[in-house]
Amino acid sequence: MFTRREAAIRLDIPVEMAQRHGIPATISDAAIGALEAEPPAWLVQSRANRRPGARPVWMRLECVVCGLEEWERPKKWWPEFTMLVCDRHDPSEAPRRAAGTVRSEVDGVGTRFVGIVDSPA
């Protein structure tokens, strides 16, 4: 069984849309598979409305140190991250920055990540 949030991630739609279109709080893998195999009109329309190059509905966040991951809706203020580090690690544990770059950190990414951005100096 999957939660509505997990189903939304798999279908690549917002949780609010899943709820609005009757996806229950828990749903079986077979039921999600059926939606993927024969998507209803609202799901087809949602996918057709996406602009090329637009932000994704969900973004996979993964710690570069330990591999911990979570899926989160990307925020407009997020820059393009070079890498992410979870709250179990200090950002200094991330791989070293490349020569000729400067490093900045962005707190508050997802529920437990620090985003690292390496930019040309």
Image: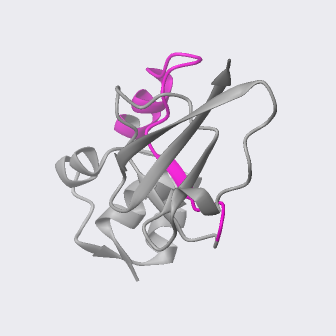
Between 119 and 49, the one nearer to me in the picture: 119
Residue shown at 55%/42% (left/top)?
116
Residue 66 at x, y percent in the picture: 63, 73
Q: Is residue 46 on the magenta stretch?
A: yes
Residue closest to the eye, 55 or 13: 55
| Residue range highlighted in magenta | 42-65
* Count of numbered marks: 0
Of residues 79 and 92, the one drawn nearer to the viewer in this rendering = 92
Q: Residue 32 in the image: x percent, y percent?
A: 47, 65
Farthest residue, direction right: 99
Residue farthest to the left? 20
Q: Position of residue 77 (x, y in %)?
A: 35, 27
Q: What residue is drawn where x is 39% and y is 36%?
A: 41
Q: Nearer the viewer, residue 98 or 41?
A: 98
Viewport quadrant of the C terminus: top right
Horizontal arrangement in the rendering, residue 39 relative to residue 107 (left or right): right
Instruction: Tell me if residue 36 is in the magenta stretch.
Output: no
Q: Position of residue 23 (x, y in %)?
A: 27, 61
Could you tell me which residue is drawn at 34 percent across and 36 percent down? 42
Q: How is the image coloured?
A: one colour
* Vertical arrangement, residue 121 with respect to residue 57, above or below: above
